[in-house]
Amino acid sequence: EIVDADAPDLLTMRSDESVMRFLDRPRATGIEDAATLIKRMRDDLALRSGITWGVSLKDQGLLIGTIGFWRIMPEHFRAEIGYLLHADYHAKGLMHEAMKPVLDYGFATMGLHSVEANVNPSNVASIRLLEKNGFTREAYFRENYFYNGRFIDSAIYSLLAGS
């Protein structure tokens, strides 16, 4: 569970340009931004519209990432997965390790039929992670998302239960 005490670690990640490069969301500028995000995670869980877990190393309590279903669509038995990892831990297989139990939880406990991921097509590392976990590309939308004064493409990946 991500708790209020994790706000400084979350701020470190959410304010890092290299971490936020493909998220197409404003970078955090202060501890209040991180605290607001943690509150939203708690609210989403209470409303059953999202669930987010913290990622940490087994021998440390430091929050080094987040992963979860930030948009749950119960009427479609579908959820959108999202994840974030501190730059110091990129390309070490940690998010791959974290994704398996999250997907297992989604399919076995939440009863999901499918999980989707909306990814910036330039985010090669994220696409590789998704494909390594069995996701396939379903769609490619050209300039469908407007952020920071420009139109951005989106690629939609999905994974079906039992795949």
Image: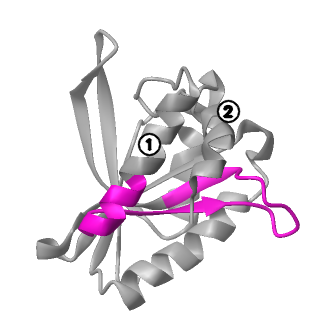
Callout 2 secondary element: helix
Specify whether 66 is left or right of 120: right
Indicate the position of residue 69 as horizontal and vertical percent values: 39, 63
The residue that mark 1 highlights is 37
In the foreground, 121 or 81: 81
Tell me what residue is drawn at x 35 percent, y 66 percent: 45
Q: Amino acid at mark 2?
A: Thr
> Which percent across, then down, holds residue 153?
31, 30
Secondary element type, mark 1: helix
> Is residue 73 placed above or below 7 in the rendered structure?
below
55 or 93: nearer the viewer: 55
Quickly name the residue at label 2.
12
Q: Is residue 140 magenta?
A: no
Q: Residue at x 61, y 34 (%)?
A: 11
Displayed quadrant of residue 115: bottom left
Badge 1, how many Cα within 10 Å: few under 14, some, many 20+? some
Q: Nearer the viewer, residue 161 or 23?
A: 23
| Res. 162 in view | no
Q: Residues within 10 Å of mark 2 (few under 14, many from 20)?
A: many
In the picture, which quadrant includes the C terminus? bottom left
Number of the label disc, if any, that sits on residue 10? none
Q: Is residue 17 above or below residue 14?
A: above
**Residue 36, position as x, y percentages in the image:** 43, 39
144 or 14: nearer the eye? 14
Which residue appears at 57% of the width and 78% of the height? Answer: 101
Residue 125 quadrant: top right
Q: Which residues are magenta?
A: 41-67
Extreme residue in the left direction: 75
Picture coordinates of residue 97 (x, y %)? 68, 69
Query: Could you say which quadrant of the image residue 51 lies in?
Result: bottom left
